Amino acid sequence: MRGEFAYAMTRPERERQRFAPIDIKEETLMTSQADAGRPSRLLRNLSAKIASIPMMLTAVVIFLGGTLWTVVYSFTNSKLLPRLSYVGLDQYERLWAAPRWVVSIQNLAIYGFFTLVFSLVMGFVLAALMDQKIRFENTFRTIFLYPFALSFIVTGLVWQWILNPEFGIQSVVRSLGFTGFTFDPLYDSDIVIYGILIAGLWQGTGLVMCLLLAGLRGIDEDIWKAARVDGIPVWRTYLFIVIPMMRPVFITTLVIIASGIVRVYDLVVAQTSGGPGIASEVPAKYVYDYMFQAQNLGQGFAASTMMLVTVAIIIVPWAYLEFGGRRRG
Amino acid sequence: MADTFALKDGPALAAARKAGVEPAGRRPRRMLSGRNIMIYGTLFVAAVYYLLPLYVMIVTSIKGMPEIRLGNIFSPPMEITLEPWAKAWASACTGLNCDGLSRGFWNSVRITVPSTLISILIASINGYALANWKFKGADVFFTILIVGAFIPYQVMLYPIVIVLREMGIYGTLTGLVIVHTIFGMPILTLLFRNYFASLPSELFKAARIDGAGFWQIYFRIMLPMSLPIFVVAMILQVTGIWNDFLFGVVFTRPEYYPMTVQLNNIVNSVQGVKEYNVNMAATLLTGAVPLIVYFVSGRLFVRGIAAGAVKG
Amino acid sequence: MTHSVSIKDLSLSFGAVKVLENLNLDIGEGEFLVLLGSSGCGKSTLLNCIAGLLEPTGGRIFIKGRNVTWEEPKDRGIGMVFQSYALYPQMTVEKNLSFGLQVARMPKAEIDRRVGRAAEILQISPFLKRKPSELSGGQRQRVAIGRALVRDVDVFLFDEPLSNLDAKLRSELRVEIKRLHQSLKNTMIYVTHDQIEALTLADRIAIMKSGVIQQLADPNTIYNAPRNMFVAGFIGSPSMNFLHGEIAEREGRLVFTTDGVDFPLDGYRSGETLAAGRKVVLGVRPEHVRVNEDGETHEATVDIEEPMGADNLLWLKLAGHTLSVRVGGARRFAPGTAVRLSFDMALASLFDAGTEERI
């Protein structure tokens, strides 16, 4: 599992080897010059270069160019159309002065923090339980993971229905005799983000469970045998031996969850459309609304640049930890 | 020796025989130990949490509206009706039109099929080039590509809009197919590159000695060996593209909206009386394609999302 | 004369790591040359350069007098056999053999003729319709050799072809490769880390270390007159015994002396004149130590005895040194037994303690 992500860590020797060129058939007779007949650098490996054109274009034009473009235009006062008239940090000042943006960031922080904590804890507990050589493992895994196959739109709409105060959980509990029971997160500005959290966890925890289960399976059986022979209780083995050994898996999982959190958009659109009022707004929605609805491109660019900064804060330390210290060759 | 025979006799007999022959072996586990009750109990409770929404969706979608208003969402239907399904498919209203989800379904098919095929074709050849035909600078592009996978889409949306507009395909299905190909590229290229790099390099060398070139090795040696990874990529792309909402809403005109956008417009439409049964039928219909892919593909799906998780 | 394969000043580096440096090697027509060394010594890299699978940083490679340094593998007139067999798993044996010929657009009749001939030589005709996964390891390696055979080439390259096989199959196929070479008389370049394969198969062995050929000679010379201490220690199992000491003169005779023990150098053929006082290392193979025989002898005690069937390996203590000694399987010694030993100087080696070169 780890290998799937860690592309830069294990480099087989052959990858460092440069293979000889292709597509050049040039018969050369014995010459005294060592480099005679050597094909030109550009033409070497031509097919591979042609095959990589889509990747090069995507990487350079879209990922690199597009990102830089957006960052540059976030310093302009573009409205309906992008214009290169610089206004310095104006857009950012306006952004941070906007209550809607501040709410979005607060929501993202709350949603992010609890998603990380709950999905890691729940995911690990489920994974540890699944790792006890249980029966029906496949059935359980199928059940825990199927929400991940569903879109955020579907997820949001289902939970919108279940949390509907008139017909959903609140009404069911009230009909059991607890008439004072109140649970309507989607209509309460103070807790609406937790309503979205419930749906988000439902959709994503299965994935975390799967990743961590694979991590657990990657631990050498002998570690467990040794711990058992030494008489270490199971919970201690998990806490002090297994979890520290799974550090890379945890970090990778963490990065995956985190980059998903920053992007949260469809779920909110489907479940609450940002309401009630602006109580469940998130940054990604802010960007979309300003770029494509409010015709205020500058704000959209500034907000998306802030999202980029958020991701960089997560990714850069991880990339450093993961690849920085150990790069060889 | 004893084990070989035991295998033929089935697990129960094998266990009995083992217990008889080797008294020092593991204590047979009791099904009702405290430990088991805790494990299965917890898993069962969790399973209920995960299954409940699916159950509620199904139950709601086959109830009539009067029953929904009276009863609670968890109670099984007293009278089963398929009318909500028919309505959801053919005549539910969005703010714009009233021809149900069918339009969105066919749009999604027209988006998903070419996007999946094109993105896999391009990424697999690209991954193969990166794994076996490295050229100077290839790693730089690849690193940008992988780092790019973590950049929020929102940052790149508008530049792509401009590029597509310049090409005259903004708002069309072609444009959306290109967008899906672009954003599928990092994870698919990584998937294929790692897969091809894991194949024995000597196979590639042998093919070179045999005189096969770039395309011959790809189509005659690598491709036939790699069907499982193509299936994984297919699962990844079909579910990912089918479930997409953001690109659909940004890059297409309303007549080309994919199913997810159509669904959201139907359910969250502010006009008219809310028909919860129709909404849930529509939701189930939209979720049906990835769910079928999921239940049919089983383990391969797990492999696919493990690789595709980077996509977020 | 033209050599079959000729390598001039070949260098190759991956980034800052120099794998091969100014390597020169001439291989004669029909010669069986073994490249021997431990992993990472550059032997496989050299083979890959000859095959055209790796691009050298400098130097030239000639095959049959033609500069092929920048040519495609398929145009070099070589066939190659790999350690992992590298058979195309989705193709039948027949397809595996004919793939390269099809790529070259050879007429079908000629393909069939060549495949049939190779299958006959290698006795794999019954398996032609099978997939590689349905074959045993030995059969797979025959198919891999067959794939080189159908190409009808001058030079065969083997990259550790027997390393994935178990000991019994390995010795069987070793004999077959030797038989193949005797009947085909092709030039063969064979990479291995197994000294038995090297000694049994080679016309000449090139022992490599860190990208440099340490000695290039026939197996007998390599074994009995190693050029330096690396070669001496690499070849032979258990390793040659090395005794550090110096040359001294005793009553007009030159002796090797270490820790107060003298061994007369009578019978040692040196390439130079030996002078007393020179710091040297004496190398003696375990089978060249005589135990309890006549002649000038020294007292030693048996430390460990390792019976190995045909042979009996003794570990002896002699004046603070541990010596491994091979004696016949029938001669048994209990630990602690005192024995007398002497060296067969005609077959021993002397090295300069500083340069580690043979003197």
Image (cartoon, coloured by chain):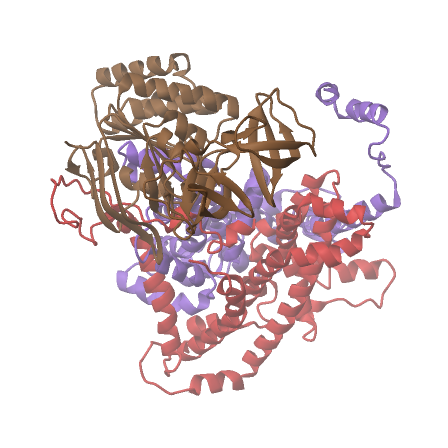
Chain colours: A red, B purple, C brown
Quarter-wise, where is residue B62 in the image? top right
Position in image of residue C282 (x %, y %): 46, 42
- Residue B202 seen in the current view: yes
Quadrant where the C terminus of chain C is found in the figure = top left
Quarter-wise, where is residue C84 in the image? top left
Residue A15 horizontal side relative to residue C169, left or right:
left
Quadrant where the N terminus of chain C is found in the figure = top left
**Residue at the (85%, 37%) spot, across then down:** B31
Q: Nearer the viewer, residue B279 or C291?
A: C291
Position in image of residue C10 (x %, y %): 25, 47
Q: Nearer the viewer, residue A192 or A259?
A: A259
Position in image of residue C141 (x %, y %): 42, 24
**Residue at the (51%, 67%) spot, across then down:** A320
Q: How many marks?
A: 0
Q: In this view, which residue lies farthest toward the front?
A: C251
Quarter-wise, where is residue C218 in the image? top left
Position in image of residue A170 (x %, y %): 77, 62
**Residue at the (52%, 42%) spot, across then down:** C262
Residue C328 horizontal side relative to residue C143, left or right:
right
Q: Nearer the viewer, residue B298 or A223?
A: A223
Residue B238 horizontal side relative to residue C62, left or right:
right
- Residue B116 seen in the current view: no
